[in-house]
Amino acid sequence: EPEVTQTPSHQVTQMGQEVILRCVPISNHLYFYWYRQILGQKVEFLVSFYNNEISEKSEIFDDQFSVERPDGSNFTLKIRSTKLEDSAMYFCASCNNRGMSYNEQFFGPGTRLTVL
Amino acid sequence: GQQVMQIPQYQHVQEGEDFTTYCNSSTTLSNIQWYKQRPGGHPVFLIQLVKSGEVKKQKRLTFQFGEAKKNSSLHITATQTTDVGTYFCAGNTGGFKTIFGAGTRLFVKA
């Protein structure tokens, strides 16, 4: 069964450093998302991406964040200058059909980001 | 901004007992989804409800969407140990942004 993959599974970085989290969505999917989940808390929407551009973003997704689909398979989230409060699990998700009738999002296993 | 509240935060049940989690949105939703997250895992899609008053069943799970499309519930009949995890509702108002509730963590004692 096709699945979303994410690398690395765990990333440790120093405050102020740049990190890039990588995702490979399911191949025929068209809509891509990044979410974050601080330990023990709810899943928070960061950004959605469709047709090679950001379709919607949350207030969390400020100028320190950017997303890119550099080729036909990868979808990346970059944090330019990490802060302690960026420590969280970051999930990538993809979806094939965003119509009203069906909106199943397939989540990847996540990347745990630890900022020291 | 839009908020999705979910209660209870935790629920401990004896295996075989029923379980219900409730979700309430501050705004009318175009659809609501339910996800299950096992400890240490990622959210897994369970179902999407779209129509006002809709009820859907998946084996022992029953999902409801309120008439006003602002609330929803998930009911599990006769829980099993395999039901443990956190159940999240997630609402969408027509855009791309999906707002998750805080989740209800279910503990099942054998």
Image (spheres, coloured by chain):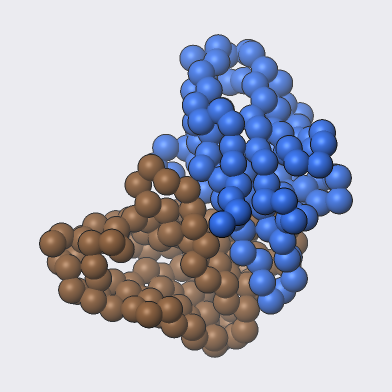
Chain colours: A blue, B brown
Q: Nearer the viewer, residue A25 or B101?
A: A25
Pinpoint residue A1: horizontal percent, then vertical percent: 56, 57
Pinpoint residue A68: horizontal percent, then vertical percent: 79, 35
Image point 15% across, 60% down: which residue? B109
Image point 62% across, 84% down: which residue? B51
Q: Nearer the viewer, residue B9 or B13?
A: B13
Pinpoint residue B104: horizontal percent, then vertical percent: 36, 59
Q: Quadrant of residue B18?
A: bottom left
Furthest-front residue in this view: A1
Q: Nearer the viewer, residue A33 or A26?
A: A26
Image point 63% across, 13% down: which residue? A16
Residue B26 seen: no
Q: Is residue B1 left or right of residue B37?
A: right
Vertically, is B5 above or below A62? Answer: below
Q: Quadrant of residue B97?
A: bottom right
Q: Is residue B57 left or right of residue A100?
A: left
Vertically, is A114 above or below B75? Answer: above
Q: Nearer the viewer, residue B48 or A23?
A: A23
Residue B23 seen: yes
Number of marks present in the image shown: 0
Image point 81% across, 51% down: which residue? A50
Pinpoint residue A70: horizontal percent, then vertical percent: 82, 33
